[in-house]
Amino acid sequence: MFGKLSESDALSKVDKMGDLSKLSVNKYKYSIEYADAPVRIAAINQRIGKVCVACDVEKSADMKNVLVMQKLNRQVDYLRYLIESIANLIIQNRGIDDFVIKYSLDLNKEIDNLDENESDALKRIKHLSTSNGSIIAVIEFIDNNLDKRLTLDQVSGRVYLSDYYFSKLFKRETGLSFSVYLNARKIQKAMILLKESNQSINEISDSLGFTRLSYFSQTFKKYTGYAPTKYRVEDIN
């Protein structure tokens, strides 16, 4: 939400971008101050996106820009509170089914019932929380590209960080390495597809970017304690 802008303002051009997460790392390039915050719906324990605010500023950094940044942080906190409050009211008055599409599979319950050692990564990502803009942007990118064979170099490059620094930052913010998080998200998606779709295991493996079916099966068992075929036919609960 940028307010009223003239056509000559940098933000007028940026507003046409599809991926606004780039603003957090490009704010000096566009001569803007920027703030964002994740939006989490408590009733479903799910982060559904983020809200961002930005404002054109002078290129030279001074006290005025600091005041603008403080104002934007207050605005983004208010907008987050507003969105989360409205969402919770909708859920209270209309029920959760009118707010989100629910799978009949209770994935969280199934994860809770897995062995602690084998499902540690799955349990961690259920309660993942970070306020770091770069990590939020990366998590959103991963979640939207689970079908691809993502590499550390690809992902770190999206937030203009070196592989080394990004790896350290990601582990600090999430408690998981990049590769462990990526595979855990893929296996989460696989659990749903195995229970809720008629796709073959080979098709599911391909759709999640695994190079070999054997590697997918090994990874699935490592994270859940079950082979994909056994998980699909048995009542894990």
Image (spheres, rainbow, N blue to C red):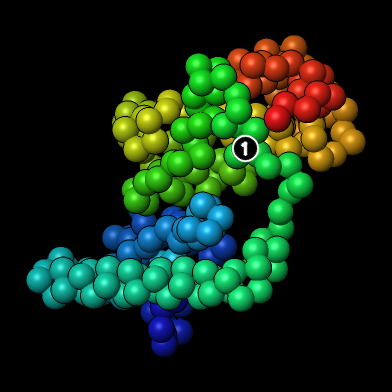
Q: Residue at x 80, y 35 (%)?
A: 195
Query: Alpha-carbon neighbours of circle 1 within 10 Å: few (<14), some, or many (≥20)?
Result: few
Q: Is residue 210 among what the camera can see?
A: yes
Would you name the residue on which mark 1 appears?
109
Q: Secondary structure at mark 1?
A: helix
Q: Is residue 140 left or right of residue 157?
A: right
**Image location of residue 171, percent across then percent down:** 36, 30
Look at the image and tell me in which quarter the C terminus lies: top right
Q: Residue at x 70, y 68 (%)?
A: 98
**Image location of residue 207, percent across then percent down:** 76, 33
User: How many discs mark residues in the rendered view?
Assistant: 1
Foreground of the two, 115 or 197: 115
Foreground of the two, 222 or 179: 222
Q: Residue at x 34, y 48 (%)?
A: 132
Foreground of the two, 188 or 26: 188
Residue that lies at the very extreme toward the left in this rendered image: 63
Q: Is residue 162 among what the camera can see?
A: no
The quadrant holding residue 192 is top right
Look at the image and tell me in which quarter the N terminus lies: bottom left
Q: Is residue 162 left or right of residue 51?
A: left
**Image location of residue 158, percent across then percent down:** 47, 43
Question: Mark 1 is on which residue type?
Answer: Lys
Residue that lies at the very extreme toward the front in this rendered image: 237
**Image location of residue 214, percent across then percent down:** 75, 12
The quadrant holding residue 165 is top left
